[in-house]
């Protein structure tokens, strides 16, 4: 609905005559009749006016500049329709002279002509004086040279209030020849302003379309799997390039010596490649709704015509214009079919796409009817094109927005999963394996390093659990581990695994950290048992063994089930020390190796107990009881 409301505004912006304008003399410009245009009552202060109407035409001759033609000819020719022959037949090729006598006020000012593209070469005379031309018109096809460029020409003074325009032109290359658009006359300043106005509008329009294309190409560069964005970006760039090639100033000012043959081939390629890209765009945007066989057949047809444009003579491929206009209509019907199916399936953006495509196809049909039936209506294809591109951009934006929202949800879910997985596999473990996240871990990954190994086990857990239900057992274990596990992390260690009612932890930093953690647990146990006593429960005891040495961290298992593990003789020694706490009736035993590796050995008090052999080792391990931290030294001042 909003597009319909904005359509009159868009038409007026597009520069269509009298679209959305109030009635004025500019919309009631006189028309030429029988080769004469009477402007004696026209006020040029009202602006320029088109030299439309009936000119006089002589086919096959270049008349002297002071002579008029013979046959009536309506200018501009509807959609550059082939000029009429003297026998009543029509042919697009040949040469001739158009003439128009203009009657001006007595005090006629200095005037200028804004001459559009005239297919395909011309010379223009005013009162016998050549004032401009493009290419080389000729009665001999071999010597004619087509050129492609509009012009702004200054008219000579009209001393007798009369100007006779004589336009010689020839065409031997393009199916559509002659004066396709209005020649306009007015003050030089007004004509220059019109030209600059048109150039500004073209620059803004085609520049905006090109930027839309480049913007979406940037999306494709960062996400190559999204092929609809690629087709849409190339589509926009080609549409912008086609408009630039047709532009009055942009391309021709940049490349003034460009060959007409190069330009006309480029224009046709930029006309017939976008429908091919549109087919690919539709097929990839709504793959479940597209008909693959139809899309391939249409793509092949457009691809074949593209080769014809590149390789065949201009006269040949321009003669195929009407059949391919029919093919464009077929593409529109096919696109409508796909989009309606997408709309019925409630695909994202299908409703917006239907509106944009419908307006675009309507403007194309109007333009084809205008060409075929000689309707004198302005071309609204640019309006349809802009509406269509904006609609496509909205559809892609909606899909991007939805994809981005989905990605955000997946990212949040993945973050929660990673946090949950860290409860099973410590982040420190990933760090030692030089992995950023758990997804990167593979079976057999390993690393070798030196750490302190810490084992803790609850004493008499079997007898304690006999008086508890399974639910109470799990509550008790989780309560205990929840109390003492954080002490390990507070001392820069991490829990490698829980072994039933016990803990295996690793301290990658100073060995002092492991000893401090064990003493902290001993102190915390006093408060923990006080709480149990208040609840009517028996106190608990634990045993801790600590050793230090080289070890290997890695993953073991098979492809469907892996686990992290630590392999080392030092692990066996630490486990053995924990078991010896029962033998020596103490709570914390450490090895001589870890005492020798302490960075601050004076911070701890220990007592040598014995030397013990660890299973599988021939060398005995020195066993020490960890009494506690050393008391601070007394001050000399008492």
Image (spheres, rainbow, N blue to C red):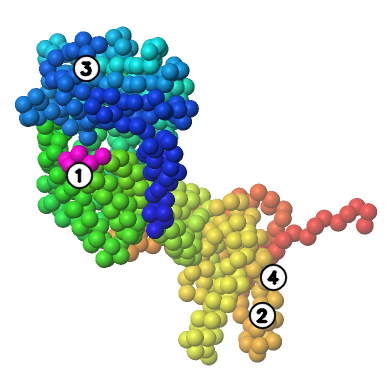
Viewer-nearest of discs 1 and 2: 1
Give residue 163's position: percent from left, percent from top: 33, 16
10 Å crowding of disc 2: few (<14), some (14-19), many (20+) = some
Mark 3 touches mark 1? (CB < 8 Å): no
Residue holding disc 2: 529
Q: Which residue is mark 1?
A: 369
The crowding category of the residue bearing disc 3, from other C-alpha atoms within 10 Å (few below 14, some 14 to 19, many at least 20), is many
How far, Cα to Cα, is label 3 from label 1?
33 Å
Disc 4 on helix, strand or loop? helix
In the drawing, does residue 626 fall left or right of residue 33?
A: right
Q: Quadrant of residue 187?
A: top left
Look at mark 4 in the image and give the residue it sits on.
523
**Few, some or many residues within 10 Å of mark 1 (<14, 14–19, 20+):** few
Which of marks 3 and 2 precedes in the sequence? 3
| CA–CA distance in space, label 4 to label 1 | 95 Å
Return the residue nearer the eye: 595 or 205.
205
Residue drawn at the location 22% of the way across and 34% of the way down: 79
Residue occupying the point 61% across, 72% down: 483
Residue at 11% across, 52% down: 293
Q: How many marks?
A: 4
Q: Residue furthest right?
A: 637
Of pointers 4 and 1, the one earlier in the residue sequence: 1
Instruction: Report if residue 306 lies within the magenta region.
Output: no
Q: Earlier in the sequence, mark 4 or mark 3?
A: 3
Q: Which mark is residue 68?
A: 3
What kind of element bears circle 3?
A: loop
Mark pair 4, 2: CA separation? 11 Å
């Amino acid at each position: 609905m909003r597009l319909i409301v904005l359509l009159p505004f868009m038409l007026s912006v597009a520069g269509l005559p009298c679209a959305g304008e109030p009635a004025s003399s500019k919309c009631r410009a006189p028309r030429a009749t029988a080769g004469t245009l009477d402007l004696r009552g026209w006020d040029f202060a009202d602006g320029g006016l088109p030299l439309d109407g009936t000119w006089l035409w002589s086919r096959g001759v270049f008349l002297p500049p002071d002579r008029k033609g013979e046959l009536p000819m309506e200018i501009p020719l509807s959609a550059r329709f082939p000029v009429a022959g003297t026998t009543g037949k029509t042919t697009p090729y040949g040469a001739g002279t158009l003439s128009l006598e203009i009657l001006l006020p007595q005090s006629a000012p200095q005037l200028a002509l804004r001459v559009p593209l005239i297919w395909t070469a011309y010379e223009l005379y005013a009162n016998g004086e050549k004032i401009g031309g493009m290419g080389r018109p000729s009665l001999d096809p071999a010597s004619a040279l087509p050129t492609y460029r509009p012009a702004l020409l200054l008219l000579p003074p009209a001393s007798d209030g009369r100007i006779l325009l004589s336009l010689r032109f020839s065409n031997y290359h393009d199916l559509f020849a002659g004066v396709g658009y209005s020649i306009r006359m007015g003050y030089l300043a007004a004509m220059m302003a019109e030209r600059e106005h048109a150039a500004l509008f073209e620059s803004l329009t085609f520049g905006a379309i090109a930027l839309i294309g480049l913007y979406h190409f940037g999306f494709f560069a960062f996400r190559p799997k999204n092929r609809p964005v690629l087709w849409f970006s190339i589509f926009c760039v080609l549409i912008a390039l086609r408009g630039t090639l047709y532009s009055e100033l942009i391309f021709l000012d940049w490349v003034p010596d460009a060959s007409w043959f190069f330009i006309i081939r480029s224009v046709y390629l930029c006309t017939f490649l976008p429908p091919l890209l549109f087919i690919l765009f539709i097929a990839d945007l709504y793959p479940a709704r597209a008909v693959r066989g139809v899309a391939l057949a249409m793509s092949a047809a457009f691809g074949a015509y593209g080769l014809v444009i590149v390789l065949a003579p201009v006269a040949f491929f321009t003669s195929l214009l009407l059949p391919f206009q029919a093919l464009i209509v077929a593409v529109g019907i096919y696109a409508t079919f796909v989009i309606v199916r997408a709309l019925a399936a409630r695909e994202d953006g299908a409703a917006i796409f239907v509106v944009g495509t419908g307006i675009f196809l309507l403007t194309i049909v109007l333009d084809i009817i205008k060409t075929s039936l000689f309707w004198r209506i302005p071309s609204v294809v640019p309006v349809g094109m802009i509406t269509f591109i904006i609609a496509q951009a909205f559809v892609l934006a909606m899909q991007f927005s939805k994809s981005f929202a989905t990605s955000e949800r997946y990212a949040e879910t993945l973050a929660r999963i990673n946090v949950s997985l860290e409860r099973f596999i410590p982040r420190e473990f990933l760090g030692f394996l030089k992995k950023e996240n758990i997804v990167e871990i593979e079976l057999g990954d390993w690393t070798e390093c030196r750490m302190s190994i810490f084992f803790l086990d609850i004493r008499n857990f079997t007898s304690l659990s006999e008086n508890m239900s399974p639910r109470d057992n799990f509550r008790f274990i989780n309560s205990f581990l929840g109390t003492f596990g954080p002490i390990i992390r507070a001392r820069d260690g991490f829990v490698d695994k829980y072994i039933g009612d016990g803990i295996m932890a690793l301290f990658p930093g100073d060995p002092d950290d492991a000893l401090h953690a064990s003493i902290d647990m001993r102190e915390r146990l006093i408060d923990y048992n006080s709480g149990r006593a208040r609840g009517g429960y028996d106190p608990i005891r634990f045993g801790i063994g600590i050793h230090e040495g080289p070890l290997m961290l890695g993953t073991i298992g098979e492809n469907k089930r892996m686990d992290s593990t630590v392999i080392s003789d030092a692990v066996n020694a630490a486990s053995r020390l924990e078991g010896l706490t029962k033998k020596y009736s103490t709570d914390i035993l450490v090895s001589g190796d870890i005492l020798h590796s302490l960075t601050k050995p004076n911070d701890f008090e220990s007592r040598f107990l014995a030397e013990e052999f660890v299973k599988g080792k021939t060398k005995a391990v020195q066993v020490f009881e960890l009494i506690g931290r050393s008391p601070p030294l007394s001050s000399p001042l008492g």
